[in-house]
Image: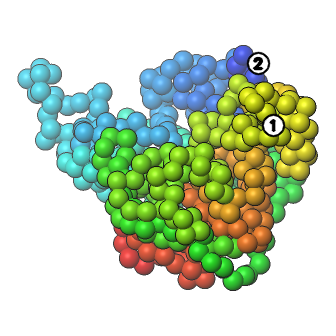
């Protein structure tokens, strides 16, 4: 078998960590090959080696049968390798054409002036050749995320890429954009391009790929033909045990209103309006999910509700009481639990122990402290109880939070917040960066809260998560609520249209 990419016995060691352990990985011409693994499994490291961002500690790389040393991305590009990173590398004030030809610009007057006409002509030629329609004259800042991704793909193709690496390509796309991406990638593969997708989304693996390689803890577990496997088998290979991919949720009637958001307005960190009159309610015994593409006001909304940002107009009511101007500590004491979207920045103090992190927010109260003196015997007993109850994988409650995996860090936060028995739980991107096993755990705990009659506000970019967990779904776009659908009437198509600002 002739492969366009062969990575043989690749090992990459960082201080104290073996990121890739004797990895063998190969890609055929004209195939879509998924590299699948949980967060931290080593898949992005492996592709960064192929693209020349890292050098392997040991091992060999062959491109189209030729042994190569890819010491930097320029060599990778020369060898026909292009990479579309998870966070796009585009210059927002520049036009589509200027971004695509950046670094290889056609010029006039001996390089004194950009030949814009030639640049536009080149972009039109390549977009027609590959069926990737773009407007070369529009600025990046004025186009959708899905269109920006097209520009990144065209940028790689313009530089002669035959091998395309896409890192988590669907992370910020609407369902319609994901579908379009699948069509684009299949067309490119049919034209002889070789596509490598890095992802952890099983649904997209099954829909888009020809083959899939599963990597776990830096080692290759197996390579399978997609048509011969299933989401359940791949999930088990990813985490090393059987995983229940279906959320078990009994139907129940919601109770009284717990959270009311009324005509809320707020500014972002730049002083630009982020919330523009948003209103909704969350009832006892329901999961109300807020869906939307990242950057449409979700972060600012949660910060206003939890006292981390001031509203400029409107109200937040908790069980009928106005909490709009209260400090965060008071809001916690009123019964609001918060799983923050950035667990490292807002959820944990990484250099403190697990035991200390388990009492954050209650550390000033008895029985954990009295007159400013901490009672560490009680703190450690409390932590041991929660570690067992929430299955936190750690040698001891005395290790620092930074030593835990992402999934176990999330379990510490969930244990702390649920132990307070909140009347309202806000879960913001609760499974971001987690493997399917940890996702299963988080989903189970959120549904348990709902079944106990608590109100749950879920804010997630993962549409599968929203549809699996929510009783009602609100869609936020440009700081406004586009509409609210019941779980029964919500479909991917309807939600996708609303996420792009349309009406379902």
- Identify the residue shown where x is 54% and y is 51%: 306
The x and y percentages for residue 193 are: 50, 47
The x and y percentages for residue 73 are: 48, 25
Q: On screen, 248 above or below 382?
A: below
Position of the C terminus, as image quadrant, is: bottom left
Q: Nearer the viewer, mark 1 or mark 2?
A: 1
Quarter-of-image position of residue 383: top right
- Identify the residue shown where x is 29% and y is 32%: 102
Q: Which residue is mark 1?
A: 368
Q: On screen, 87 above or below 350?
A: below
User: Of 409 and 397, which appears nearest the observer?
Assistant: 397
| Residue 16: image tag | 2
The x and y percentages for residue 214 are: 75, 45
Q: Earlier in the sequence, mark 1 or mark 2?
A: 2
- Identify the residue shown where x is 66% and y is 57%: 335
Q: Is residue 105 left or right of residue 31?
A: left
Tag count: 2
The extreme left residue here reads: 109
The x and y percentages for residue 412 are: 76, 43
- Identify the residue shown where x is 72% and y is 82%: 252
The extreme front residue here reads: 371
Q: On screen, 434 above or below 21?
A: below
Labels 1 and 2 touching (C-beta < 8 A): no
Q: CA distance from mark 1 to mark 2?
A: 35 Å
């Amino acid at each position: 078998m002739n492969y366009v990419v062969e990575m043989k016995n690749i090992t990459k060691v960082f201080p104290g960590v073996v990121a890739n352990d004797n990895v063998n990985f190969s890609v055929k011409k004209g195939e879509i090959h998924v590299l699948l693994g949980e967060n931290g499994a080593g898949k992005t490291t492996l592709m960064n080696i192929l693209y020349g961002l890292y050098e392997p500690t040991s091992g060999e790389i062959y491109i189209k049968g030729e042994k190569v040393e890819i010491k930097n991305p320029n060599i990778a590009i020369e060898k026909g390798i292009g990479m579309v990173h998870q966070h796009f590398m585009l210059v927002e004030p520049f036009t589509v054409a200027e971004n695509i030809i950046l670094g290889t610009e056609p010029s006039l007057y001996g390089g004194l002036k950009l030949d814009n006409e030639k640049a536009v002509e080149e972009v039109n030629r390549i977009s027609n050749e590959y069926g990737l329609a773009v407007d070369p004259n529009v600025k990046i800042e004025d186009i959708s995320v899905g269109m920006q991704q097209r520009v990144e793909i065209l940028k790689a193709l313009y530089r002669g890429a035959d091998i395309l690496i896409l890192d988590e390509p669907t992370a910020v796309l609407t369902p319609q954009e994901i579908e379009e991406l699948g069509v684009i990638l299949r067309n490119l593969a049919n034209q002889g391009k070789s596509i490598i997708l890095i992802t952890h989304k099983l649904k997209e693996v099954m829909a888009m790929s020809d083959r899939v390689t599963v990597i776990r803890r830096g080692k290759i577990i197996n390579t399978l033909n997609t048509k011969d496997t299933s989401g359940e088998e791949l999930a088990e290979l990813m985490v090393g045990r059987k995983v229940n991919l279906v959320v078990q949720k009994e139907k129940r009637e919601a109770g009284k209103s717990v959270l009311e958001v009324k005509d809320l307005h707020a500014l972002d960190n730049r002083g630009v309006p982020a919330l523009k009159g948003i209103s909704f309610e969350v009832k006892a015994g329901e999961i109300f999910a807020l869906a939307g593409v990242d950057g449409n006001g979700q972060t600012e909304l949660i910060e206003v509700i939890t006292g981390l940002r001031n509203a400029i107009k409107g109200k937040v009511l908790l069980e009928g009481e106005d909490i709009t101007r209260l400090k965060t500590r008071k809001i916690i004491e009123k019964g609001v639990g918060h799983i923050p979207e950035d667990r490292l920045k807002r959820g944990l103090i990484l250099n403190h122990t697990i035991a200390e992190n388990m009492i954050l927010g209650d550390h000033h109260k008895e029985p954990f402290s009295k007159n400013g003196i901490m009672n560490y015997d009680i703190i450690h007993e409390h932590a041991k109880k929660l570690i067992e109850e929430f299955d936190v994988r750690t040698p001891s409650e005395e290790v620092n939070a930074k030593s835990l995996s992402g999934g176990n860090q999330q379990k510490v936060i969930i244990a702390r917040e649920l132990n307070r028995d909140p009347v309202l739980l806000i879960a913001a991107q609760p499974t971001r960066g987690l493997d399917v096993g940890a996702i299963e755990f988080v989903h189970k705990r959120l549904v348990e809260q709902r079944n106990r009659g608590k109100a749950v506000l879920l804010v997630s970019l993962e549409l599968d998560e929203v549809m699996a967990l929510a009783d009602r779904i609100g869609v936020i776009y440009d700081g406004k609520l586009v509409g609210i659908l019941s779980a029964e009437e919500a479909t991917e198509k309807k939600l996708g249209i609303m996420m792009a600002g349309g009406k379902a």
